Image (cartoon, rainbow, N blue to C red):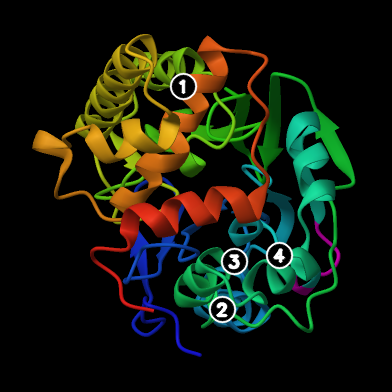
Amino acid sequence: MASEHSIAGPQIVRLRGGCHLWQQSAGGWGMSNAGLIAGRDASLLVDTLYDLRLTARMLDGFAAVTARAPITTVVNTHGNGDHWFGNQLVEGAEIVASHASLADMRQVQPADMARLMAPETPSGRFARRIFGGFDFAAIRPVLPGRTFERELTLDIGGTCVQLIDVGPAHTAGDTIVHVPHARTVYTGDIVFAGATPVVWHGPFDNWVAACDLILGLGAETVVPGHGPVTTKAALHATRAYLEYVHEQASARHAAGMSPGEAARDIPLGSFADLAESERLAVNVHTVYRELDPDLTPLDGPQLFGHMADLACPRISF
């Protein structure tokens, strides 16, 4: 079954100071970016992709650079599979992630994606709609061999690269990759350019604080986890969305609405044009969990079921 997002047309975007972006032009669910930071004789790869075909194509695309500066280090920015399922193809490189990201990776692996898509339920059909174009069958999970807490500085062929875990926010651990001399930051999924942020973990305040931290770095080039290379304006936009949803969901929690009722009731206003707006269902539930710690967390099929319910007016199964 085809995904709702095309996987044609990826491109390399050459940035300053040896930095590169591999942008999967369609964006959207599962269509993440990867980055390459090339030093004199070594490179660091920021994330692999959701399946082996996409990762192999990305590595081929970077081959002209990596022929002179081989990939010695891979950084997985967080535990969602579209940022690490291709790790097995980067042989010989040291794989690095935050300790919290490694814990996430152990919880959701390629076989879990097949189970998510299998049922003839709204959640299963929705998952097939957005993930059906990816091939998880041949993936051998390769986990990071090196972890860190909060911050780690690496020397990549004479280039200083700073890793900062700004999570929990999008997930339990969210690493940004800062290249100071190039005034460039790879944000992972702290930034979705042109798409709706999804707060799988939270708290919201941490994500807002992460935006502020990145703004304080003084980077001029912002490489998002999904979508085209952008600027600091994307951080302000992300911050505004998170604050708006938290405020709106909190008001409906106080009024006694259920999370599902609240998600259907919240007007998106200036955020209505963001892609994947059904992620609001997850975000509202995360706000409710913050406000009521006794609220039972939802598992993957339940979360995707809520998104399917919110997306139903726009998507026919």
Is-magenta flag for residue 90?
A: yes
- Range of residues picked out in magenta: 89-93
Name the N-terminal-most of marks 3 and 4: 3
Q: Secondary structure at mark 1?
A: helix
Name the N-terminal-most of marks 2 and 1: 2
Q: Identify the residue position indicated by label 4 in the image.
A: 85
Residue in front for this viewpoint, 122 or 274 = 122
Q: Is residue 125 above or below residue 275?
A: below
At horizontal 41% and vertical 45% (from top left) the residue drawn is: 17
Q: Is residue 86 above or below residue 21?
A: below
Name the N-terminal-most of marks 3 and 2: 3
Residue in front for this viewpoint, 82 or 203 = 203
The disc at residue 49 is 3
Residue 225 % position (x, y): 45, 49
Amino acid under label 4? Phe
Of marks 1 and 3, the one in the foreground: 1
Name the N-terminal-most of marks 1 and 3: 3
* Camera sees residue 11: yes
Q: Residue furthest right?
A: 145
Q: Identify the residue position indicated by label 2 in the image.
A: 54
At horizontal 63% and vertical 81% (from top left) the residue drawn is: 56
Q: Rounded to the nearest whole Å, what is the CA distance between mark 1 and mark 3?
A: 29 Å
Q: Is residue 26 above or below residue 245?
A: below
Name the N-terminal-most of marks 4 and 1: 4
Q: Main secondary structure of the magenta part?
A: loop
The disc at residue 287 is 1
Q: Is residue 162 left or right of residue 218?
A: right
Q: Residue furthest front?
A: 256
Of marks 4 and 1, the one in the foreground: 1
